[in-house]
Image (tube, rainbow, N blue to C red):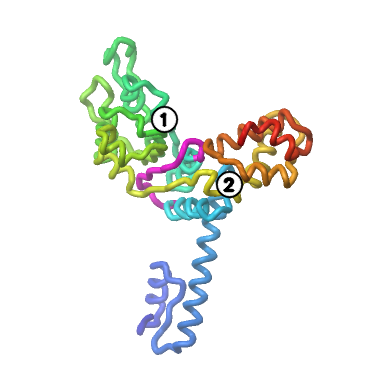
Amino acid sequence: MTAHSDLDSAVASYQGGAFEYLPKPFDVDEAVALTKRALAHALEQREQVAEQVMEDSTEIIGEAPAMQEVFRAIGRLSRSSISVLINGESGTGKELVAHALHAQSSRGKGPMIEVNCAAIPSELIESELFGHVKGAFTSAIKDKAGRFESANGGTLFLDEIGDMSLSAQAKVLRALQEQKIQRVGSDKDIKVDVRVLAATNKDLIHEIKEGRFREDLYHRLAVILIDVPGLNQRKEDIPELVAHFCSQIAAEQGAPIKTFDQKAIRLIESFDWTGNIRELRNVVERLIILGGSNITEEEVHLFAQKK
């Protein structure tokens, strides 16, 4: 609302993000109607952001309310380079959320470098992350850049960060705080511009209490927390996921797309999916290999190996 209904005021209002402005004096009914239109517009824009996230991240599927919360979080963070901690059970698709966060951000055209902290021996993790100089250790025959340097201008995704050694955690904390790293065996600082996304299937609060994870690093990473729901929390998404995997597996194998009848789908929905999306895909692939062109309830009983 403004008492100065001139061009400069109008331009300043819209540049500041206003939906509309009302010059004084104004009619109350007009103000209410305008507010309703603004709210409707805001809801439409929010839905478009969620749809755009799903379109641009075709591997992320989900109509369930729990997944819509994930989509909203990705949408809200689309203009941010802030650190995010992604929580979720094994097999829920945490890495897909990380890819969507990167793709939707201003760093989307930059590199996204992934590090599985659980797959790298603790004695090598620091060299992998920060690089090393020649002679730093026995097999260091030449200088080598680490993953932080490779991700410069983009995103570094630290998967299963709960398995990272405490010494590496201290260096990651420094890199986040100061935006610079040192290669193993060197005291020279190297400036880096990296957004760090991290994921874990562990309870990091418990890990902190047990002395296995640094509390200061946790608070630095968990500026924003995204909880990826397990499949048992979003069973209404199973039919769409099954159809997606059928198409995906058929393309990989160069084979016709198989289908599942409704009784087969209902039986699959009744299972306990402790292995989450990864387990569901494995079961679908097994059924496609062993079943007929239209997978039946009996074939699910025979081949799914689920109770």
Residue 15 picture quarter:
bottom left
Point out residue 180 in the picture as x, y percentages from the top left corner.
27, 35
Q: Is residue 56 left or right of residue 83?
A: right
Residue located beneath label 2 in the image? 61
Q: Residue at x 39, y 30 (%)?
A: 150
Tag 1, which secondary structure?
Answer: strand
- Residue 209 position within the rendered picture, expressed as x and y whole percent measured from the top left: 26, 38
Mark 1 nearby-residue class (10 Å; few <14, some 14–19, many ≥20): some
The quarter of the image holding the N terminus is bottom left
Instruction: Quickly name the residue at label 1.
Output: 115
In the figure, 185 relative to 105: above or below?
A: above
> Residue extending furthest left?
187
Q: Residue furthest top?
A: 138
- Which SS class for mark 2? loop
What residue is rendered at 54% in x and 65% in y?
A: 44
- For the stretch drawn in magenta, what is the main secondary structure? loop
Residue nearest the observer in this picture, 137 or 187: 137
Does the magenta segment cover residue 287? no
Residue 129 % position (x, y) = 34, 27
Task: State which quadrant residue 290 falls in.
Answer: top right
Q: Which residues are magenta?
A: 78-93
- The reply, left or right, for residue 74 in relation to residue 289 is left
Q: Is residue 251 visible?
A: no
- Of mark 1 and mark 2, the one earlier in the sequence is 2
- 218 or 90, nearer to the observer: 90
Residue 126 shows up from this direction: yes
**Left or right: 290 in relation to 283:** right
Q: Residues within 10 Å of mark 2 (few under 14, many from 20)?
A: some
Location of residue 178 in the rendering, given as x and y in whole percent from the top left corner: 24, 39
Quadrant of the image occupied by residue 115: top left
Residue in the foreground of this view, choosing between 214 and 41 = 214
